[in-house]
Amino acid sequence: MMASASINPDKLNINATNNQGQSLIWLASKKGFAGIVTFCLTMKADVKVRDKAGRNCFDVAKTKKCRELIRKGLTTNYMRPVCHGGTYSQQN
């Protein structure tokens, strides 16, 4: 039997940072994890959060896809996922 987890967006601090000032979207961008970047944007992550060196997630984004998502996320109002199946909706 598989355990399922649901995320309560009211209890999740999507902008929490580590001791270097790096948030989840910052780390995902640096590693090139576009799916996690999309999730963070869906959860309304702040792309302007800077690490201790003054870099934000766009500055460290490893891939073009991550940079495009971040750029688009600045102008798109994301809705919460419709279901846990990994499908995300966008509202312009």
Image (cartoon, helix red, strand yellow):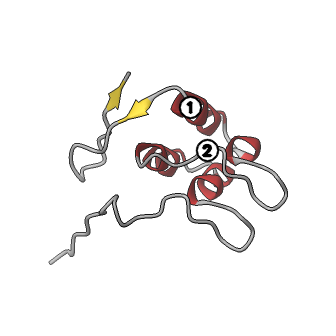
Kind of residue at disc 1? Leu
Q: Residues within 10 Å of mark 2 (few under 14, many from 20)?
A: many
**Who comes first in sequence, dot 2 or dot 1?**
2
Q: Which amino acid type is marked by label 2?
A: Val
Residue 92, above or below 77 = above
| In this rendering, position of residue 16 left or right of residue 49 | left
Q: Residue at x 76, y 42 (%)?
A: 59
Can you give x and y, in whole percent of width and height, for residue 54 in the image? 82, 52
Q: Nearer the viewer, residue 29 or 22?
A: 22
- The quarter of the picture where the N terminus appears is bottom left
What residue sits right under mark 1 in the picture?
74
On-image quarter of the C terminus:
top left
Given contact means CB atoms under 8 Å apart, are the residues at marks 2 and 1 in contact?
Answer: yes
Identity of the residue drawn at 34% across and 58% down: 9
Percent position of residue 6, x then y: 25, 64
Asked whether, in this view, residue 20 is left or right of residue 34, the answer is right
Front-most of residues 28 and 14: 14
Which residue is found at the position 81% from the left and 62% from the top? 52
Residue 40 location in percent, x, y?
A: 48, 50
> Left or right: 69 with respect to 38?
right
Q: SS at mark 1?
A: loop
Mark on residue 23?
A: none
Can you name the residue that lies furthest to the left here? 1
Vertical relation: 89 (above or below) 4: above
Q: Residue at x 41, y 64 (%)?
A: 12
Q: Local crowd at mark 1 within 10 Å, few (<14), some, or many (≥20)?
A: few
Please give the count of numbered marks on the rendered protein.
2
Q: CA distance from mark 2 to mark 1?
A: 8 Å
Q: Check disc 2 and report the residue beneath it.
A: 47
Q: Residue furthest top?
A: 92
Q: Secondary structure at mark 2?
A: loop
